[in-house]
Image (tube, rainbow, N blue to C red):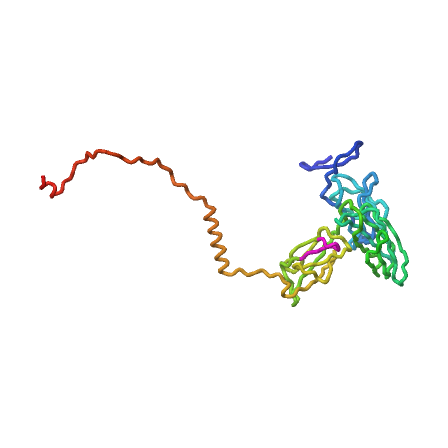
Amino acid sequence: RTDVAGSSKAASFTATGVGTNEPTYSKKTIDITVRDQNAEPVSGRTVTLKTQAGREIASLVSGDNGLTRFTDRLLDGTFYQYFVDGKKIGDIVPGESRSAYVNVAPKKDYFTFTVTALDKDGLVVKGKEVTLTDITDGKAVALASLKTNDNGQAIFTNLPLSRNISVSIDGKSKGYTLRTDVAGSHKAAAFYVDGKGTKAPQFSAEAAVVTVYDANGNTIANQEVTLTNSNGTIVAKGLTEKDGKARFANKLMAGTLYNIFVNGIEMPKTALVGSDVSVFLTDKQIKKEKPVTPDKLDKEMNQEKEKELLDTPKPVPPTSKPTAPIKNKKDDSPKKFTKSQSSSL
């Protein structure tokens, strides 16, 4: 029922039979912000979205602003259940946002870490075993082991602070060490693994920013900035703006380090979503726009005029029927005699 003229409604239902194609998914998002009793945002909480039949759509961990944003495989007009740390909070449809309130006890000395497994094409891989090991004291001590879910994620909670933690997937070390002393914080990282992925990962809602300076500390516009992943694949490309910043907000993953290239030159720093990285160029590395000289400008204008003349259709002269030459026509016009002719007569 609606009393809004011209509005469009949608709904989805489960029916018996064999399906043929994927449905048309919504372009709208579902935003759920986790808050405490004082309406302050709460990070590190696992928010899960499920269908009414209980099938999990996605599971995300709230960031520092408490926000989780669901973007994939949502159907317009369909109600989804959302849970925080396994407890159902309510129902929501695409295009809506909700605040989920939780009781927060005093902070404990732990943090949360999410690992995402990707194939070579950047799609998430389910069923990979992720193991965390404490290597702080020189002796490996196993902390936890989980298999990646449908979203390619293994979400570890209650991890100890101020410890050096290494990551391995399917028994292979990823050469990555994690450490933090911030209680209640959430960390994330993505790794490439063997196997075939199924779908795109959950990308971060935050942007990665690269600011380009010259040797004197002045920002530079119109410099080409490229980000690549650890496989060398280009994931983002753009030009710096007037403030020297290139902003990348699409298809980047939280906790993943991206290599930075400026004008094709690799920089010694890496980019990360939620951070602003400064890089410096020498004078030779700066991409400069060539000034247009007056002679070159005149030449370009003349070339443009010539092109216009060539492109302008020429008028076609009217055709006329040719006249045949006159042959043996008798001249009946009166003769005019000169004085010399008349005297001879």
Q: Is 343 on the left-hand or right-hand side of 115? A: left
What count of labels does the image hold? 0
- Which quarter of the rendered picture does the N terminus lie within? top right
Query: Is 303 or 91 nearer to us in this picture?
Result: 303
Q: Is 236 on the left-hand or right-hand side of 325? A: right
Q: Is residue 342 magenta?
A: no
Query: Is 189 or 245 nearer to us in this picture?
Result: 189
Across and down, in percent, residue 241 comes to 64, 58
Image: magenta residue range:
225-233
Q: Is residue 171 above or below residue 93?
A: below
Q: Is residue 230 magenta?
A: yes
Residue at x-position 29% and y-position 36%? 325
Across and down, in percent, residue 163 comes to 86, 61
Query: Is 199 or 36 nearer to us in this picture?
Result: 199
- Which quarter of the rendered picture does the C terminus lie within? top left
Residue sitting at the far bottom = 216
Residue at x-position 90% and y-position 56%? 142
Across and down, in percent, residue 204 comes to 75, 52
Q: Is 24 on the left-hand or right-hand side of 154? A: left
Query: Is 67 or 303 nearer to us in this picture?
Result: 303
Across and down, in percent, residue 227 comes to 70, 56
Residue at x-position 46% and y-position 51%? 306
